[in-house]
Image (cartoon, coloured by chain):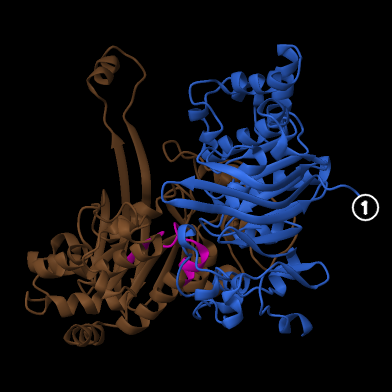
Amino acid sequence: MSEQPTIEVRNLRTHFFTKAGVVKAVDDVSFSVGKGRILGLVGESGSGKSVTGFSIMGLVDPPGRVAGGEILFQGRDLAKLSEEEMRKIRGARIAMIFQDPMMTLNPVLRIDTQMIETVLAHDKVSEAEARKRARAALVQVGIPSPDERLKAYPHQFSGGMRQRVAIAIALLHKPELIIADEPTTALDVTIQGQILFEVQKLCRESGTSLIWITHDLSVVAGLADEICVMYASRIVEKGTVDEVLDHPLHPYTRGLIGSVPSRNVRGRPLAQIPGMTPSLLNLPPGCAFRARCPRASEACLVEPEMTAPLPNREVRCFHPHLETVAA
Amino acid sequence: MTAEAEIGRRARVADSTAPMIELRGVSKQFRKTLDLAGRIAQRLGANVREEVVHAVDNVDLAVKQGEVVGLVGESGCGKSTLGRMVAGILPASSGTILWKGQDVKTLPPEQAKAAKLAIQMIFQDPYASLNPRLRVDRIIGEAPLVHGLVTQGEFDAYLAQQMRRAGLDPAFKRRYPHQFSGGQRQRIGIARALAVQPEFIVCDEAVAALDVSIQAQILNLFMDLRRDLNLTYLFISHDLGVVEHLSDRVVIMYLGRIVEEAPAEDVFASPNHPYTQALLTGVPRIDSRKRAFSAVRGEIPSPLNPPSGCHFHPRCPHAMARCREEAPKLKAIAPGRRSACHLNDGAA
C-alpha cells in the first residue's frame, strides 16, 4: 500500500458560525480512500457526514467554513485552492451525487443541454463530440434508448431514471473520486439494486474511488471496503467492513448494528440506544456519546482521542468492546 | 386502569377464528376528470380521455385478531391506498370491507362509529401528520374527550397515562409539535392513535422517516403495545427488514394487485412469485458483505397504463406468452400461502 491515496482528509474541521454560537459540524475528521476503493461514511441525521462531503467539494456556504485541517486530493490540499482552481477540479476530477437528483438537474433544460454544458465546462471539444460523450454516459448507467432520452426533460423521467442521469453527469469527465450523498435513500428496492449494481461495476472497471455517505448500514455492508462511523461531528470508529460490522469496538457502532432488524432477531426486541442525538450547539464536555452509553464512566468526562487498539482498527473510546474480537 | 380492563374484555369477547377485518374484491380507481377545455377538445375529436388509475385492483385480504400483517410493495403499488381504505379514510370504489364479519357500509350508525374508532392509523411523516398549531394535550386528548371515552375530571390522569404508554414525558403536554424531535413526534402520533382505545392499527410507513436507532425504539414500542393491548396491526412498509422483523404474515403487492401472501418465515425462506424473489435478492442486508448487486430489469410501470396480463411480465425473467395475455389468479399453493403466477400451474 505504498500507492498514494486518491483522497486523504486530515483533521478536517468545518464549523458554522451562527448567531446562536459556533456549530462544529465536522470536528477532527481524518480518513483516506485509495484508488478504486469504496468508503462508507455512516451516521445518523446531524452527524456531519454530508457536511464532510460538502467540505471536500468546497461547497460549504457561509456562515460555515472549513476552519482547519487538510483535504489532500492526489497530494494537493483542496482547502488552500482558490475558487478558480477549485472550479477546475470540481465536476471534472471530483464529482458529487446528491440524494435528490432534482438538486442536480435543471427542470427547465433538456437532458442533452445540461450534459453537453457539463462536458464543455471542462473540455474544449466540439458540440457533436460532447453529445457523443453524453450519450455514452447514459448507456454506461443503463438508460434504454439514450438518443430519445437525451431530448427529454427531467420531469419526464422516473425517480430512479433521474438518479441515473445524475450519475451519468457525474461520470462525464471520468472523475477520480465520486462523493455520493445518500443517492439511493429515496429509491425503491429494485431500483436501488440497479443503481448499486452500476456503481459497483464502475469502481471495479475504471478505478474510481467512491465515498458513499449513508445512514443505512446494510447498503454499506454489501458495497464498501471500509467504514467510518460518525457520531456528533466526529468519526468514532474506522476499519474494514467485515471488522467493523462483525466486531464493533465502539458502543455506538454496536448499538447501531443492534438497531437494524435482521434475520437472527426476528420478533425479539431490538437492541435500542436510549435517548437521542445531542444538539451540536451545546455538546456536553467529554465523549459526546456518554449520556447514551452503557459503558460510560468517570473517564468519559474527558474527550477520548482516536486510538488504534488493534492493527488497522481505530476507535474513539475509553472502553472499546475488545472482548468480542478476542473471541 | 379501567381503559386497560375494557380493552382486555373486548379482546376476550372477540371471536378468535373469524377475521377481524376482511376485504373482498376491493378496488379503488382514481379518476382525473376532463376540465372544460378537455371536454371541448374531445367534442372536436381530439384524442383526450379521462385518466383512470387503478390504484387497488380486486384485492382479497383478511386479518385475524391479534395478527400482524406486513404489506410490502414499491412506490405506486397501492399499499397506502389499501391501508387508507381499511382505516375508513377512503371509500372503496367497489368490493366489500367487513369489520368483524359485518359490511361496514351497512352497519347501523352507532356500530359504524364504534368500528371507525376501533381502527386507527399511524402515518409516515411525523412532521406533516400533526397539527402544528395544537399543543400535545389537544392532539392526543381531543378525540377521547369528544367521543366520551373520558370525562373532563379524569382527563389529566388519562392524558398522562396515554403519553407515558407511548414513551413521552407527561410534563411536555403543553408543548407544540415543533418542539419535539422526529422520534418523539412519531410517539405523539402513536399516543394519538391509541388514545381512543383502538383494536386495529394501520401503520403506513410509520418508521420510514426515522434514523436507525430511533426506528429501533419505535419498533420495540410497537411490539410492546401489541403484547400489552392485544393490538392487531396492518403494517405497511417498503422496508423488508422491518416487515420481516414484525410480521406474522406478509402480503406483497405489485401495481395494485396482491402477488403473494404467506407466513413471514415462508416468504423469506422460499419466495414463490418472481417479483418477491427479485425484491428479496435486491434488499441489502447487514450480514451479506461485498456482494455483487444484481439488478431486476426495467422500471416500475406507471399505474396509469399497467402492462397487460400479469403486471410483472415485462420485468420477469420467466415470462411466457401466456403472461402477456392472461392475468394470473391468486391461488393457494400451500396451506396459508397464496401466489399469483402462471408458473405454479406446472410446466404445461
Please tell me which residue is depicted at 29% across the width and 69% down the height of the picture.
Answer: B21
Instruction: Establish if A217 lies above or below A18.
Output: below
Q: Is residue B219 left or right of residue A260?
A: left
Indicate the position of residue A182 as horizontal and vertical percent values. 58, 49
Quarter of the rendering containing residue A136: top right
Q: Is residue A229 left or right of residue A243?
A: left
User: As shown in the figure, which amino acid type bears the numbered disc 1?
Assistant: Ser
Q: Secondary structure at mark 1?
A: loop
Image quadrant where one finds the C terminus of chain B: bottom right
Image quadrant where one finds the N terminus of chain B: bottom left
Identify the colour of chain B in the image: brown
Badge 1 crowding class, 10 Å Cα cut-off, few under 14, some 14 to 19, many 20 or more, is few
Q: Which residues are magenta?
A: B202-216
- Between B160 and B48, the one nearer to me in the picture: B160
Q: Is residue B320 visible?
A: no
For disc 1, the chain is: A
Indicate the position of residue B330 as horizontal and vertical percent values. 46, 59
- Between B149 and B12, the one nearer to me in the picture: B149
Q: Is residue B18 left or right of residue B307?
A: left
Instruction: Establish if B93 lies above or below A279.
Output: above
Please tell me which residue is depicted at 17% across the width and 78% down the height of the picture.
Answer: B158
Residue furthest to the right: A2
Instruction: Establish if A291 lies above or below A90.
Output: below
Identify the colour of chain A in the image: blue
Q: Which residue is tagged 1?
A: A2
Please tell me which residue is depicted at 59% across the width and 71% down the height of the picture.
Answer: A252
Quarter of the rendering containing residue B194: bottom left
Indicate the position of residue B165 as horizontal and vertical percent values. 30, 78
- Answer whether residue B91 is magenta in the image: no
